[in-house]
Amino acid sequence: MSILSYEKKHKMREKIGKKRITKSILLETGKISPEEFVLAGDNLVFKCPTWRWATCSKSKQNDWLPSDKQFLITEHVPCLKRAHELTSGLEKDFIFEDEGGDSWISPENLDELPKKKEEEKEKEKEKEEEKEEEKESSSDEEVVEGFDISDDEIESANEEDENAIISDEEVDIVKSRTYNITITYDKYYQTPRVWLQGYREDGQQLTTKEMSEDISPDHFESTVTFVPHPHLEVKTASIHPCKHAHVMKRMIDEMGTRNKVLESKNYLLLFLKFIFAAIPTINFDFSQGFEL
């Protein structure tokens, strides 16, 4: 079955499938009701103002959610590095494998990995500053007393310097990308679902191949599909929700060992912490005011 055929079938299962949750089963299963999704979304928007609720055309709205709260979105999220640059060692001490063999950040390390990410950013910043200092040092003019040089030689040297400067700039340019990230509620799996829409610096949408470079290799093959967004007329990369409840339940159980209980309103704050494992270089806002 093709991916598009599967998604079409899944959409039908959402419409006529599982019964709507009428009472909270969050702690027992890691799943949430549409009402809990709205509550958690309101709290995410409050805690992390870069997120907001959005709606869509009436024909694409789901009747189990308010018309003005069909999905959550954060826009123009920077992505300065490719995923393999960060995942080649940073995550290996922080992940666990689920029953299907997919890797996710260990619950006990969810609060540590963002700190590691910040440390990596600081190291990169220091490297860039060192490179700038070396460049400035090498370009300083040396004045030698009594040394004569012709005007033609000066002009030729200046042209060479200009060419060298252009070349250096080209080498140092970081091709930044940005992403729009949306979160919908999947009624069949009874969990949130994340969708990614990437753009180049010139505003053109990233290709499937380019977006795959910003997704952790551990997740690209097994949990990510490239499909049309359910509410928007764009093709997106989507992190499939089939295992979300299992991973959330594991994290909820881990909180229980510390005598902590996950409230429904904080569900998305915790959810986005583990989604971070799949897209570690896309710097979306998810951790304000909440620790595992």
Image (cartoon, grey):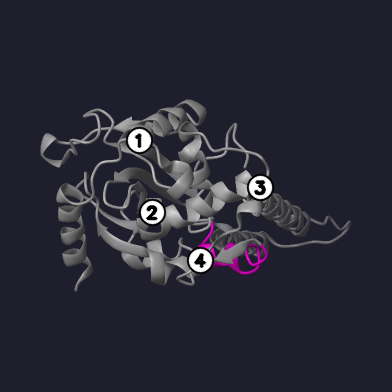
Q: Earlier in the sequence, mark 4 or mark 3?
A: 4
Q: Label 2 near label 4: C-beta < 8 Å? A: no
- Residue located 44% across and 29% down the image: 45
Q: Earlier in the sequence, mark 1 or mark 3?
A: 1
Determine which of the numbered discs, if any, sits on residue 200 in the image. 2
Real-space CA distance between mark 1 and mark 3, rounded to the nearest whole angstrom: 24 Å
Amino acid carrying label 1: it is Lys
Amino acid carrying label 4: it is Asp
Q: Earlier in the sequence, mark 2 or mark 3?
A: 2
- Residue located 12% across and 34% down the image: 58
Determine which of the numbered discs, if any, sits on residue 73 in the image. none
Badge 1 density bin: few <14, some 14–19, many ≥20, Cα 10 Å: few
**Magenta span of residues:** 81-93
Q: Label 1 near label 2: C-beta < 8 Å? A: no
Q: Which residue is mark 1?
A: 23
Amino acid carrying label 3: it is Thr
In the image, residue 6 sits, relative to residue 50, either above or below, namely: below
Determine which of the numbered discs, if any, sits on residue 257 in the image. 3
Q: Position of residue 77 (x, y in %)?
A: 45, 44
Q: Which residue is mark 4?
A: 98
- Residue located 40% across and 48% down the image: 179
